[in-house]
């Protein structure tokens, strides 16, 4: 059909092999019905993917500091306020599963339909979730789950491997799986490891292809029967929107919408670079104009995904900072996707009250705005290669929020009610500005060099969305929907 001759090409420097063609043609009567064709003429320089997780410290000695999920010494030196509302299990410098469960109100909730509730986790390009690391994590942070033989299903797609040697374990996958299992056990958990790479458009910040093959994962999921489909999907990866070909992005976004219609709530990390890269030279458009621009994140910029930002400290919670967390919660406005109507009131209020004409031309005020919500994303204690490490990122906050929504679904499923599915309209029309979320008003999404970026503010903002969730309040509001 493509009228193309494919050959094996070898990279002169790396000796990597790839099958490609230098040209292809589609029949005229077919071309109008094709979104895009990938894996044909693009020659990328492959390297490990850019996830949204940052290791803050290696080989953390938390034994005997952590015993049975509790931190022996409370350290809230970064909270800047009283400690009356913060559980004694919480320590701003070493955040454990027990702390998160108590702080967000899920610790006393026992899943009622764990075999019917199902949470999925996306993994891309060589990320490996290790069973031994999970067991080590549970030994100190969820011993009840360890006694209950907590585990997860490992699904490999598109040529991905499942190497369970301890040295093959990687931080992103460990963070995702351990956060979810620590929060939701005994809810069924699946890790979808996906190989391959998608179409790509380089820019100054991303000169080679580190983007993820979302399409392969989504096409697999939409083919699953309802009883095998997860009701929540957590994705801790993100690409600069402008490095993703627009047709590819729109196709992926359409499949996210399809999952939402089938009752799946999809969550994605908003990024760890604030409004862009680490210097202003990286923050330019790649359309040939080289105009200065904040960098948007995909798939957070897709309206059918619930985007999650990150906060640190506990009383009050505030936007993550480079100094303490080594990451800055990402946020912004899409240049590919228009702002959906359900966002109008919240976003226009922010732009009118706080933004004005500042940074004119650096972002698209009419684009889909993100993130939608936020949660703790700083210094999680995670087991990688048999040792504890501190990991920060919207990679941490995303599986945390996904886990909370999975427990909400569990409560609804136990009453024979439908899962929440596509969540954003409900967030913007009812839940967002309610007691179900703690409004975060401290901090900014700095980036692109010296730009302060967008600031957290009352109500919705493009740094932490509506803020962080209160499980008990959310449960009250969604159980009778």
Image (cartoon, helix red, strand yellow):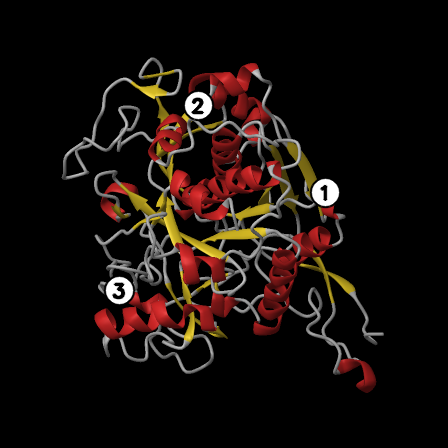
For label 3, count other residues whose C-alpha is less than 10 Å away and answer few (under 14), some (14-19) or many (20+): many
Mark whose residue sits in front, 2 or 3: 3
Can you give x and y, in whole percent of width and height, for residue 93 in the image?
27, 32
Can you give x and y, in whole percent of width and height, for residue 39 in the image?
70, 64
For label 2, count other residues whose C-alpha is less than 10 Å away and answer few (under 14), some (14-19) or many (20+): some
Residue assigned mark 3: 453
Which residue occupies the foreground of this view, 37 or 342? 342
Could you give the CA–CA distance between mark 1 and mark 2, rounded to whole angstroms?
Answer: 33 Å
Residue located farthest toward the bottom when viewing the structure as drawn? 28
Q: Can residue 452 be seen in this view?
A: yes
Q: What element carries label 3?
A: loop
Figure quadrant of the N terminus: bottom right
Which residue occupies the foreground of this view, 263 or 398? 263
Is tag 1's residue or tag 3's residue first in the polypeptide sequence? 1
Determine the residue positioned at 57% across, 33% down.
129
Q: What element carries label 2?
A: strand
Q: Are marks 1 and 2 in contact (CB under 8 Å)?
A: no
Q: What element carries label 1?
A: helix
Q: Do the residues labelled 1 and 3 touch (CB within 8 Å)?
A: no
Is tag 1's residue or tag 2's residue first in the polypeptide sequence? 1
Q: Name the mark on residue 387.
A: 2
Q: Can residue 43 be seen in this view?
A: no
């Amino acid at each position: 059909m493509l009228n193309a001759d494919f050959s094996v090409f070898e990279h002169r420097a790396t000796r990597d092999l790839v099958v490609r063609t230098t040209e292809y043609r589609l029949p005229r009567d077919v071309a109008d019905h094709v979104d895009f064709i990938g894996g044909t003429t693009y020659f990328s320089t492959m390297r490990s993917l850019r996830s949204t997780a940052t290791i803050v410290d290696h080989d953390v000695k938390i034994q005997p500091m952590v015993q049975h999920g509790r931190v022996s010494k409370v350290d809230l030196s970064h909270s800047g306020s009283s400690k009356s509302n913060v559980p004694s299990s919480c320590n701003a410098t070493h955040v454990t599963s027990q702390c998160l469960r108590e702080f967000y109100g899920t610790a006393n909730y026992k899943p009622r339909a764990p075999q019917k509730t199902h949470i999925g986790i996306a993994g891309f390009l060589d990320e490996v979730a290790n069973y031994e690391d999970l067991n080590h994590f549970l030994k100190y942070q969820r011993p009840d789950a360890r006694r209950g033989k907590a585990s997860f299903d490992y699904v490999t797609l598109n040529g991905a491997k499942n190497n369970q040697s301890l040295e093959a374990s990687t931080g992103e996958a460990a963070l995702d799986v351990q956060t979810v299992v620590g929060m939701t056990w005994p809810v069924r958990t699946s890790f979808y490891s996906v190989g391959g790479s998608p179409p790509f458009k380089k820019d100054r910040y991303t000169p080679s292809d580190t983007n993820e093959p979302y399409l392969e994962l989504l096409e697999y999921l939409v083919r699953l029967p309802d009883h095998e489909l997860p009701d929540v999907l957590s994705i801790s990866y993100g690409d600069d929107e402008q490095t993703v070909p627009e047709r590819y992005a729109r196709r992926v976004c359409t499949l996210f919408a399809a999952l939402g219609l089938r009752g799946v709530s999809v969550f994605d990390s908003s990024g760890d670079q604030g409004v862009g890269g680490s210097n202003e030279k990286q923050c330019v458009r790649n359309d040939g104009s080289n105009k200065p621009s904040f960098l948007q994140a995909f798939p957070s910029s897709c309206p059918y995904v619930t985007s999650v930002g990150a906060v640190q400290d506990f009383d009050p919670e505030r936007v993550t900072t480079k100094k303490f967390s080594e990451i800055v919660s990402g946020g912004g406005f899409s240049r590919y996707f228009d702002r959906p109507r359900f966002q109008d009131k919240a976003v226009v209020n922010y732009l009118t009250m706080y933004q004005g004409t500042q940074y004119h031309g650096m972002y698209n005020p009419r684009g889909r705005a993100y993130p939608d919500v936020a949660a703790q994303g700083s210094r999680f204690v995670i087991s990688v290669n048999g040792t504890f490490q501190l990991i920060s990122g919207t990679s941490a906050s995303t599986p945390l929020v996904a886990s909370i929504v999975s427990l909400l679904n569990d409560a609804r499923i136990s009453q024979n009610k439908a899962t929440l599915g596509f969540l954003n309209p409900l967030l913007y029309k009812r839940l967002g500005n309610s007691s179900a979320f703690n409004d975060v008003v401290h901090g900014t999404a700095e980036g692109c060099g010296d730009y302060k970026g967008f600031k957290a503010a009352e109500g919705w903002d493009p740094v932490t969305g509506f803020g962080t969730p209160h499980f008990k309040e959310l449960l009250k509001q969604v159980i009778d929907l």
